[in-house]
Amino acid sequence: MAAKPTKKSAKKKAKAKNTKVKKAAAADPVIYKGLAGVTVDTTEVSKVMPETNSLTYRGYAVQDLAANCRFEEVAYLMWHGELPTRAQLRKFEKDERSRRNISRPHVEVIRQYPKRAHPMDTLRTSVSYLGTTETAWGGEPAEKDLDRAMDMLAKIPTMIATDYRFRKGLPRKTPRKDLTMSENFFHMCFGEVPPKEVIRAFDISLILYAEHSFNASTFTARVITSSRSDIYSAVTGGIGSLKGPLHGGANEAVMHNLKEIRTPARAEKWLRDKQAAGELVMGFGHRVYKQGDSRVPTMRAALEDLAKWKGDTKWLEISDILQNIMVSEKNIHPNLDFPAGPAYYLMGFEIDMYTPIFVMSRITGWAAHIIEQNASNSLIRPLSAYSGKKQRKVKAISKR
């Protein structure tokens, strides 16, 4: 039988432990700015496979999904883990199409938005308004949040299109149940469905934008979810994060840059001036991909098809000049936003619509992560290293 520790030995151990803690606290902590390189959790939703440099959704390479599926099939995959059978897809589509319309009070809320407000701000508010229509909390059964996610998947395109029509001084177009998500969005925005080349390119963009692991907006949504807040709050937070030009807003910045360049003859000088000034060139570089974004070739091919259909290759020519210099001289490759920006422009969308379209797609990935976070939750609460003033005493005004 082991001897019981004496009071003296227990005090000695406690003192040694306290000394160890103090030394650890006094040591300079390792700072991972932007959480770069930090793994905070596991996920089954997506991964960039290092051996193939391919982004995968639930194990499927995104380029294969884009080549063989419609966006609705990928949305089903995100939430159910497997691609749907024909029967499952029909049921999923019927459910989504039945939810597309938004309430009259919701329409009136959108009508009141300032006409000069950015569509990401109006969309953020529209999603938040949707969240006021029920009492929702985190940690509820996954089926409940799947139902809410389906509601947002169906209604977000309607919110975006309704706001667009009102900003243009046009009457809103109600959604149609006989159209795919992509077809219906064009109908609600422009009053007509474009040729299949355009619909296919748009559908491909939605598939490519649907998910990308713990990016800034997804992590924001998971942080909010981890506090046991609701899915509407998490998605609203995700929209706020996605708005930034270093994240989702980059596709808007890309097209603004291309329009600023105007012609292929001006492209190289524009880039050299940017580099000399030490400014970021939007649409290039990625924290995950070092040898090129696996989504780019697929979106680039869609952009080429659009350019042929439109008879306008100017944006492709400018893009090629920028890309050739950035890759050959800096080894910095384009990301998905680089071909997506001019693709949306050729489709007829105004530049400030690009990031809201991103939301239409990314709601699938966000919802998958929100449900995953709730299933095995731990409050996300990192530490910080204080660099301010040492503790000091307050002197009352009367004594100064």
Image: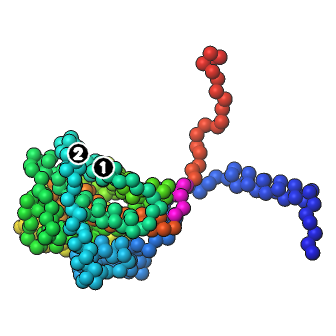
Which element type, helix, strand or loop, lies under badge 2?
A: helix
Residue 25, image x, y percentages: 69, 52
State the residue in front, 311 or 359: 359
Name the image quarter holding the C terminus. top right
Task: Please identify the quarter of the rendering in which residue 67 is found.
Answer: bottom left
Residue 259, image x, y percentages: 16, 53
At label 1, which amino acid type do we have? Tyr
Q: Which residues are magenta?
A: 377-382
Which element type, helix, strand or loop, lies under badge 1?
A: helix
State the residue in front, 216 or 135: 135
Residue 47 visible in the picture = yes
Residue 261, image x, y percentages: 17, 54
Q: Which residue is mark 2?
A: 109
Q: Which residue is mark 1?
A: 129
Q: Is residue 98 magenta?
A: no
At label 2, which amino acid type do we have? Val
Disc 1 packing (10 Å; few <14; some 14–19; many ≥20): some
The reply to whether discs 1 and 2 touch (Cβ–Cβ < 8 Å) is: yes
Which residue does the image show at 12% across and 73% down from the upper left?
197
State the residue in front, 330 or 44: 44
State the residue in front, 291 or 232: 232
Q: Please count the marks in the image.
A: 2
Which residue does the image show at 65% across and 17% down from the upper left?
399
Which residue does the image show at 18% across and 67% down from the upper left?
182
Quote the CA–CA distance across marks 1 and 2: 8 Å
Name the image quarter holding the N terminus. bottom right
Which residue does the image show at 58% across and 43% down from the upper left?
387
